[in-house]
């Protein structure tokens, strides 16, 4: 009788848990919808650790607590699987063709999304503005060659928000057609950034250079030309894609070569910078007067915000006038930040918070919410 009573109690509890499971998964659906709208990846190991730590503390029995941790971990995995299923239709715009580093970054950040190729940074950006795609993954900086000015300009003039910034290690290789040897190569083709990253190698070998829209298009052009004297500088993934041979590995000058990719979406997600390690992107112009820039920088400093990055970019519609791109540590939604931004607007003609992010590594996927 005691056994049957215990089984009946478990049956009743399971019935209640089934109802709670449905309710929980409906809440998970809303989270998936939010992430999709704001261009946020599903994975977040830090959040998972916080959930497990906080909720396992509700179990007083230490022995049962270890089993509850396993229960929570399984529940989280089921929730993530549901989110992956819901977000399979996410459309991710990138510049270039399949095999380009932006394509690689897009697939690593949004493994369930559909990567959609566009011929330029501008068309990829506009695809999100128009609603044709949900997010755009675009490079903003390379650790060796510096900023990607075209994307910063889109950030300045466009209406999208940055809700994530991810690092992707870049290894450039020399790719030739089948049968080619390193000694055959006279000309290398690649994106200007890649050519810059491999400048020492190019000079040492006496190669002529030609530019391409991106590294994957360079590889495609070399494959189509089928000339042993012409090689591309691109990723090894691109070699496999276009049937090329890797003639030389790791030809980039810096062995710590990394490109930062930003995720752009139509909706803003300020919470992404509210934890330790968060930062926000600030764009502003200054008055054309003595000390204009110093006034702005001193004001930001006065509110105890450290600038990780500060760059100037020319304004296309106003010759010899510039805007400034800055990355500031902290939470742009804090009361202190709001006061700083309000004060900055009092001395700067234009101030724009373009996004919030926490640094993450594209190699391990996104960790944004």
Image: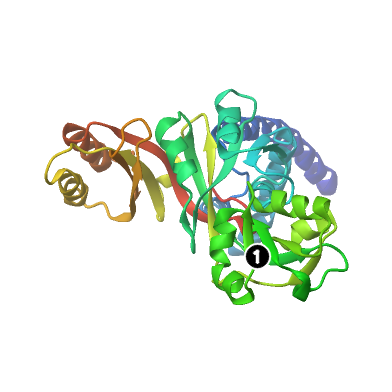
Q: Position of residue 30 (x, y in %)?
A: 60, 30
The relative height of residue 26 versus residue 57 in the rendered view (above or below) is: above
Tag 1 secondary structure: loop
Q: Position of residue 340 (x, y in %)?
A: 22, 40
Q: Front-most of 162 and 312?
A: 312
Q: Position of residue 4 (x, y in %)?
A: 85, 43
**Scheme of image coloration:** rainbow
Kindly identify the residue that appears in the image at 34 percent across and 40 percent down.
283
Residue placed farthest to the top in the image?
A: 130
- Reading the image, the residue beneath label 1 is 172
As drawn, is 261 to the left or to the right of 349? right
- The front one of 318 and 168 is 318
**Residue 223 in which image quadrant:** bottom right
Residue 67 location (% of width, % of height): 68, 59
Q: Is residue 232 left or right of residue 160?
A: right
Q: How many residues crowd around disc 1 within 10 Å: few (fewer than 14), some, or many (20 or more)?
A: many
Q: Which residue shows up at 25% across the image and 37% down it? A: 341
Q: Is residue 31 visible?
A: no
Outermost residue, left direction? Answer: 290
Q: Nearer the viewer, residue 173 or 163?
A: 173
In screen coordinates, is 255 left or right of 248? left
């Amino acid at each position: 009788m005691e056994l049957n009573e215990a089984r009946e109690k478990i049956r009743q509890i399971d019935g209640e848990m089934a109802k709670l499971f449905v309710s929980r998964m409906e809440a998970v659906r809303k989270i998936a919808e939010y992430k999709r709208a704001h261009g946020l990846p599903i994975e977040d190991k830090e959040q998972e650790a916080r959930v497990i730590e906080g909720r396992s503390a509700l179990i007083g029995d230490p022995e049962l607590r270890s089993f509850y941790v396993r229960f929570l971990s399984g529940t989280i995995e089921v929730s993530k699987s549901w989110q992956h299923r819901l977000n399979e239709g996410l459309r991710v715009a990138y510049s270039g063709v399949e095999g380009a580093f932006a394509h690689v970054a897009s697939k690593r950040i949004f493994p369930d999304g559909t990567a959609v190729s566009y011929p330029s940074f501008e068309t990829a950006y506009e695809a999100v503005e128009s609603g044709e795609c949900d997010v755009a993954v675009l490079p903003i900086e390379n650790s060796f060659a510096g900023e990607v000015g075209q994307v910063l300009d889109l950030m300045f003039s466009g209406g999208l928000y940055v809700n994530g910034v991810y690092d992707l290690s870049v290894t450039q290789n020399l790719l030739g057609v089948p049968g080619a040897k390193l000694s055959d190569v006279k000309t290398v083709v690649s994106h200007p950034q890649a050519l810059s990253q491999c400048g020492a190698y190019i000079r040492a070998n006496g190669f002529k250079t030609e530019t391409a829209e991106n590294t994957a298009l360079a590889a495609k052009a070399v494959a189509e030309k089928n000339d042993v004297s012409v090689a591309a500088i691109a990723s090894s993934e691109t070699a496999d894609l276009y049937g090329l041979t890797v003639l030389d590995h790791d030809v980039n000058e810096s062995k710590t070569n990394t490109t930062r990719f930003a995720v752009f979406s139509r909706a803003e997600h300020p919470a992404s910078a509210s934890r330790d390690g968060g930062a926000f992107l600030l764009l502003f112009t200054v008055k054309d007067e003595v000390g204009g820039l110093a006034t702005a920088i001193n004001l930001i400093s006065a509110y105890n915000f450290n600038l990780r990055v500060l760059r100037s970019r020319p304004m296309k519609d106003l010759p010899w006038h510039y805007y400034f791109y800055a990355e500031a540590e902290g939470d742009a939604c804090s009361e202190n930040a709001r006061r700083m931004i309000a004060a900055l607007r009092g001395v700067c003609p234009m101030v724009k918070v373009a996004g919030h992010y926490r640094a993450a590594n594209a190699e391990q996927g996104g960790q944004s919410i």
